[in-house]
Amino acid sequence: MQLFSAMKTSTLAISLFAVVCAAIIAVTQVTTADKISRNEREQKARALYEIVPRQSIDNDLLEDTLELVAPEITGDTQPVIAYRARKAGRVTTVILPLVAPDGYSGRIDLIAGFNADGSVAGVRVLGHKETPGLGDKVDTKKSAWVFSFNGLAKQGTDDPRWAVKKDGGQFDQFTGATITPRAVVNAVSRGLDYFAANRTHLLQLSPEHTAEVTN
C-alpha cells in the first residue's frame, strides 16, 4: 500500500513537472517569436546589403521580391524568394538563394547577386557545417575567398574557368579542403546559368513598380 502511494505521488509530481515545463516552453516561444523574426530579418538584410550597398540603390531590397520555383539552383521544387535592387527605374541586380548540396559536410546555403550585365555582384554563405579551419573558409568571417567571385561572368554554360584550380579553373581551393570550394563554385556557376536563362523575367519590372516609376 505504501509502495502504491509512493508511486502515485511520484507520478503526479512528474506530471506536474511536465506540465510546468511545457507551459514555460510555450510562453517562451510566444514571447520570443517577434524578437527571433526581427533578428532573422536583420541578419538577412545585412547579407543582402553587403552584396548591394544600400546607398547604391533606391528601393528596399527586403520589400522588392520575386517568388520563383527554381530546382536548378536549389534542388527543391518549393518556391524561393529572390531580391531585386533597383536604381532609376530599372533592376540593376538580382539576388538569388542558392544551395550547394555537395559540401564536405552536407548542404551549403548561400545567396548570390547577379548584375544586369551578367556579372556576379557578390556571394555570401549563409549556413554550412564545413570543417572548422578548412572548409569554413567560404565564410567571410574566416577568409576573403568568397570575394573572388566579384565582377566575374561566364562565357556560356560550359566555361572551363568556372572550376577550382585543381580542376583546371580559376578559383583557389583551400589547403586540405577542395570539396567545399568546388561545391560553392559549382553552385554560383549554376546560379549564373539560371540568371542568363531567365534574365528577361528577373529584370522585368512588375506593373506596380512600372507605375511607381512613371508617377
Image: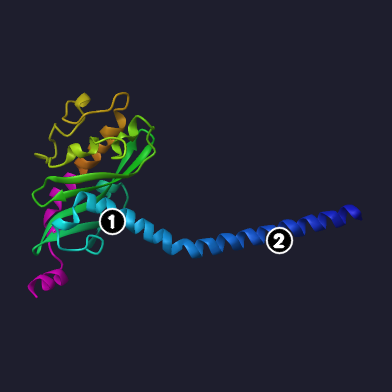
In the rendered view, tell whether residue 155 sits above or below residue 64. above
Which residue is nearer to you in this view: 141 or 103? 141
Q: Residue at x 59, y 61 (%)?
A: 24
Left or right: 3 with respect to 57?
A: right
> Which residue in the rendered view is the most extreme toward the front?
55
Q: Nearer the viewer, residue 200 or 173?
A: 173
Q: Closer to the camera, 39 or 151? A: 39
Q: What x and y, as percent, mark residue 10?
A: 78, 55
Q: Residues within 10 Å of mark 1 (few under 14, many from 20)?
A: some
Residue at the outermost bottom position:
215
Q: Which residue is mark 1?
A: 45
Which quarter of the figure has residue 191?
top left
Quadrant of the frame with the C terminus? bottom left
**The N terminus lies in quadrant:** bottom right
Which class describes the residues within 10 Å of circle 2: few (<14), some (14-19), or many (20+)? few
Mark 2 or 1: the one toward you: 1
**Quarter-wise, where is residue 85 in the image?**
bottom left
> How far is the residue under mark 2 from the one under mark 1?
43 Å
Amino acid on which the number 1 mark rests in the picture? Ala
